[in-house]
Image (cartoon, rainbow, N blue to C red):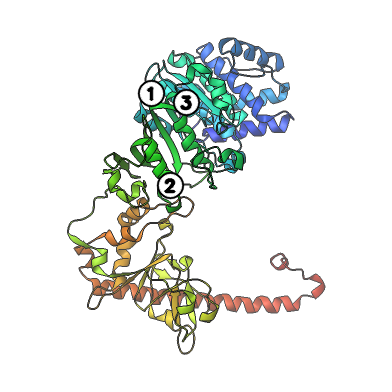
Amino acid sequence: MARRSTPASDPWNRVARHLDEAIAARSGEPVFDEALKLLVAKLYVEHGRAPARPDAGFDPVDVAGLNALLRAALQRWPGVLTDGATRLEAPAIQHAAAIVRECWLGDDHLSGLNAMFQAMMSRSSRGEKGQFFTPHAIVRDVVARVQPRAGERVADPACGTGGFLWEAMRAAPDCTVWGFDHDPRAVQVARALLCVAQPFWLGGVGGGVYAVDSLKRGAIEDILGPDHAGGFDVLLTNPPFAGDIGAEVGQSYALGTGRDVERDVLFLERSLGLLRPGGRFAIIVPDNKVAAGRLAFVRRWLLCHARLTEVIALDRGAFLPHTAQKACVLIGQRREEAEPAPVLADSIVFIQTGGASCRRSVAQLDAGWVLAPERYAVTVAPTDGRVLAERVEVVTVAHRPGVLPQQKPALVLDTSHAVEGFVVASHAPVAVATIASPKRVLQPGDVIVSRLRSYLRQIAVVDDALFDCVPGGNAVFASPEFIILRARPGGVAPAALIPWLLSPAVQAMLAASEEGGQHPRFRRETLEALVVPDGVLKDAVGCAAQVVAAAAALRRSLRCMEGLVAAVGSVDDRLQHAIPEALYRPGQREQRR
């Protein structure tokens, strides 16, 4: 957001929310349509009269005043609105105008106006389709890497509010931009942005933005006509990550024939089909498309039809607050002719979250044509040490329920029981015969490391007390999501590694190596390859003893707290019995107190 746009305490999304509330509370008209008109009128005042301040000249007090501004805006920017007259009444106009009066919408290359439009779009409608607008910083970086040039035809088949298109037009004012989207409201916003953008960069908008189902074969081609039969020169897009596509649509694609695939897989094929041979592209895809084993056929198809040059991992927070979905950017060129098999000599630059990068040939990719940057990008590691797999044994064997040891009841740990170095579990052991899924068998002194969601720091020492939960003792089993670190004969006690495993440097490396969308995991090989500096284990015996002692102290504290809770519970029960039954209703106990 531009510094001059709003007060520091009032970012764009807050202004958009206030504008939404002001119109909804004082009018029964569609909020989005009327807010769009008000913002276009405000922008016309800013740039039509070149005010010294954002609020200068913008003071519509009634219907006639706002409509006069809208007529002037339509004369300057034909097509910016489909309806050039407000349906609001004077009180609503005055209140809404006061909210946006201090905003400088056209500052910083319209980024403020774009942010306002995106904030006004319904979060629920975007989430249902897996459609989340691409942050401007990512758009700007992607466009800079693809480098649209003057005279080129640039397209986005899932353009949303047109972010990629107007950034491309900013980078190359003489390019022609074409946008397509299934959401008519998003198309209306994109048209407004591109129409208004024209005088800022002195370029021709060309092309156009159209409400159309881009996945429907022939729909875009019918709009383009014969002049565009050769395809676009550049394609930039962030297609929806989910949504029902219908069997008929899916079967019209090579990647969808005979398969149940997601919408973004079809967009990948559709996007390359819209490019001319040799045309350049940048496509954002969810993380499972670059790593999931079941989608190896998609990556093979892509490598046969395109020459990838870069794969960039986006930060997990890139699309927050809408989703924590992890994604990657695929950048490359459509091949002149599709190859029968991936070209093994082609090389790809993999860029990891945080900036680490490396180059790999297609022949060096992991099995299944894995394109996840986390597999290949190099992280600088200490040289004064040995890898973790040489320090301790890494156990990954999981036993099926039928072959688990049956002699004793078992305390079963899932990932929620490992917390910042300790096992925190108050549940009782169960009969092994009741366990229905594979488990790992633990030993005293093991360290469990959850490979799922590293940011939860689910790492813990398995101390002796966990094996004495019932008279006669019990076994301890763990979820297969845990990787087990176990001492080698005469080797390092794994407990000594816990402070290092929880350190910021190691946590950052594990987070950067995660793969997967909604359930991110790092690979066992990543953990095994971490270099444990010699200095970390300078006093391994003393460190391990302190970790175990801390676990025992925590367990004593937990037992003390459980006793306090039990004591309060007994008082609560006596209070309940003292109250006539007629006054007691479940869920009202707190109110009675």
Q: Is residue 46 left or right of residue 375?
A: right
Residue at (19, 61) in percent of width and height: 385
Residue carrying label 3: 155
Q: Nearer the viewer, mark 1 or mark 2?
A: 2
Residue 212 % position (x, y): 59, 28
- Spatial separation of the CA atoms under disc 3 and disc 1: 11 Å
Residue 391 image label: none
Type of amino acid at the residue the image marks with label 3: Ala
Tag in front: 2 or 3? 2
Residue in the picture at 64% in, 29% down: 32
The tag earlier along the polypeptide, 1 or 2, is 1
Tag 2's secondary structure?
helix
Q: Residue 316: in sight, yes or no?
A: no
Q: Give the residue drawn at x 33%, y 55%.
A: 504
Q: Earlier in the sequence, mark 2 or mark 3?
A: 3
Q: In the rendering, which numbered label is found on residue 148?
A: 1
- The amino acid marked with disc number 2 is Phe
Q: Earlier in the sequence, mark 3 or mark 1?
A: 1
Question: In percent of the image, x 71 and y 64: which residue is there?
Answer: 591
Q: Which mark is residue 297?
A: 2
The reply to whether dot 1 and dot 2 touch (C-beta < 8 Å) is no
Mark 2 crowdedness (10 Å alpha carbons): few <14, some 14-19, many ≥20: few
SS at circle 3? strand
Please rate how many residues cluster around mark 3, counting C-alpha atoms within 10 Å: few if below 14, some from 14 to 19, many from 20.
Answer: many
* Residue sitting farthest toward the left: 384
Closer-to-camera residue (88/250): 250
